[in-house]
Each structure stands twice: as structure tokens, then as C-alpha cells.
Amino acid sequence: MFDDFTDTRIDVGDVALRVRYAGEGPPVLLIHGHPRTGSTWHRVAPQLLDHGFTVVCPDMRGYGRSGKASILADHSQQSKRVVAADLVRLMNVLGHERFAAVGHDRGCYVALRMALDHPDTVSRLVVIDGVPISEALARCDAKFAHDWYHWFFFAQPDKPERAITADPDAWYGGKAKADTMGTENYDEFRQAIHDPATVRAMLEDYRAGLGVDREHEEADRRAGRTVRCPTLYLWSSLDDMEDLYGDPLAIWGPWADDLRGHPIESGHHVAEENPDDLTAALRSFLR
């Protein structure tokens, strides 16, 4: 994976982030989701590099080989605001004061927060397979609670850690994913889920989501803040965005001044399952 990329760790303040990067063209930050690491982009990043982009693939704080912050009572050490600030500092260290941000799954919440908190920094925003946390919670019904029960289970103290670390492979799906993910990506994912500190930090992501992250989004809506840069929303046609929300673009509409979007034929982990169509969509939008 990432044959032409630099692989290093960079100190951004509270933590050091593991990051892979390469290129000399327009900068693009790729933000992974749960329970992945930056290696989830291993089939997309080289294609973007070949098409002239500078590509940056970090592990978010708490995830993968990046540092784990001390846990606070309100879980704000893993808030999307703090994670977004980490990544802005990372990009600044790499020499990029303005860049495109692409986020998938939990990473899409970080990318949204980054665009709202740092409007002069994010030139274009791509969000994949998610709606704002506050919007999901406002629409929570029996189907959401059943299908996305993990949001609420992960928010409980201690028990999720005990359940997951007892058998991480069983919890996260086991060996069947290796073929789809690619061997090296799978090995990196598996190393992460077998690290109790990483598991706890990933759970802290969800705990922050139901608390401070929701509050931050609700404050944005009250203040009328929107994403000012062009925004692309992509969703996996074989995932559950349409089942849950009908037209997910209708939910994103009030959040972004310049919104477009469409589905991609794939399951949830689109960067691994349909990297070619995802790359084509990104290239078209980011140019």
C-alpha cells in the first residue's frame, strides 16, 4: 500500500498523528471512519496522486497508530471540533493552508466540523455515508435505534470496551473482510481493533457524538451557520442512507450553500468496495 507515499508521525499539539502523504498538486485530505485507519483509502489515494493531486491520509487521533488523548469527563478530547483542529494543524505543518476535505462515516462529521469551524481553510467539502449527527438523532425512531443500536451501546461506560476487547475479530466481522479490504489494509485494521487503547478511543468518538458534537451542531443551526464552500454528498446505494432518510440530500440542503450529490453503487466501505467510481466522483468535483 501507498508505495510512493511518505509514512510518518507529526506532532500537532496534544497528540502525534500517523500520516501518509504524497504529491505536489492541489491538496486533498482524506478522513477515514470507524473502525478503519487511513489505510482504508489505499485504492483511492494512489489514483488521486496519479491525477495530479497532493493526497494526505492520516489516522485520526485515537485511531490506528495516532496518539490517544487523556479522557475528559465530557469526552470532548475526541470531539469532532478537536479532531478537525488536529487535522488543520497537520495540513499546515505539511504546507497546506487551504485544501479540500473528504470524510467518510465518522470522518464525514469531522470534515463537516472542519468546514464550519475553518471556513477559510476548506476549499471544497466531500461527505460520504452520513448525515449530521444532530439530524440523525432528531429523526431517531425504532428503525434507527434497532439498526444503529451501536451508537447508544458505545455511549455506555465500560461495557462496550469489555464486549469488544473480549473478541475483537468476532465483534468487527472476522476474516471474511480480508479479501474485500486487501491484505495489508486488513492487517492494519486488525492491529487497530486488537489495541485496547484504540478501542476505547474509538468508543470515545461515539460518546462525544451524542454529547458535545450534537451540541455544537445545534448551536450552528441556531446561529444560521452553513458550509460556504462547494459541497458534494455521496452515499453508498447498498447501504441504508435511503432506507433511513429517503433523499439524504434533502437533509444536507440546509447545511450547505452549494450542494450537489449522488449515490455510488457500493456497500458502506466505498473506498474499498468501489474505489474507481469514488475516485471518478472526487476527481470531477475537486478539479
Image: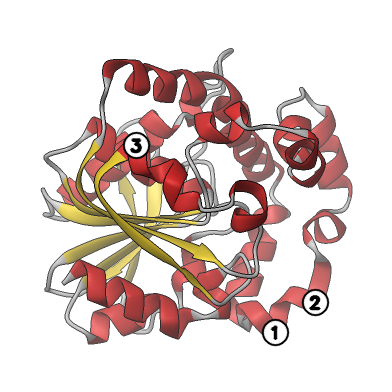
Q: Which mark is residue 179?
A: 1
State whether residue 166 is above or below residue 225: below
- Percent across and percent down for residue 82 are 38, 30
Dot 1, how many residues are within 10 Å of its Cα: few (below 14), some (14-19), or many (20+)?
few
Q: Residue at x 56, y 19 (%)?
A: 211
Q: Residue at x 26, y 47 (%)?
A: 90
- Percent across and percent down for residue 87 are 31, 44
Tell me how far mark 2 sits from mark 3, CA to CA: 39 Å
In this picture, residue 182 sits left or right of residue 8? right
Quadrant occupied by the C terminus: bottom left
- Percent across and percent down for residue 136 are 58, 36
Label 3, on which residue? 254
For residue 115, what is the image quadrant?
top left
State whether residue 74 is above or below residue 52: above
State whether residue 48 is above or below residue 11: below
User: Can you tell which of label 1 and label 3 is closer to the viewer?
Assistant: 3
Task: Give the SS element for disc 1.
Answer: helix
Tell me how far mark 1 sits from mark 3, CA to CA: 39 Å
In this picture, residue 94 sits left or right of residue 6? left
Identity of the amino acid at label 3?
A: Pro
Q: Work out whether residue 137 or residue 55 is closer to the camera in this orientation and state it.
A: 137
Q: Say whether marks 1 and 2 touch (CB < 8 Å).
A: yes
Identity of the amino acid at label 2?
A: Ala
Q: Is residue 60 visible?
A: no
Task: Give the SS element for disc 3.
Answer: helix
Q: Work out whether residue 127 or residue 114 is closer to the camera in this orientation and state it.
A: 127
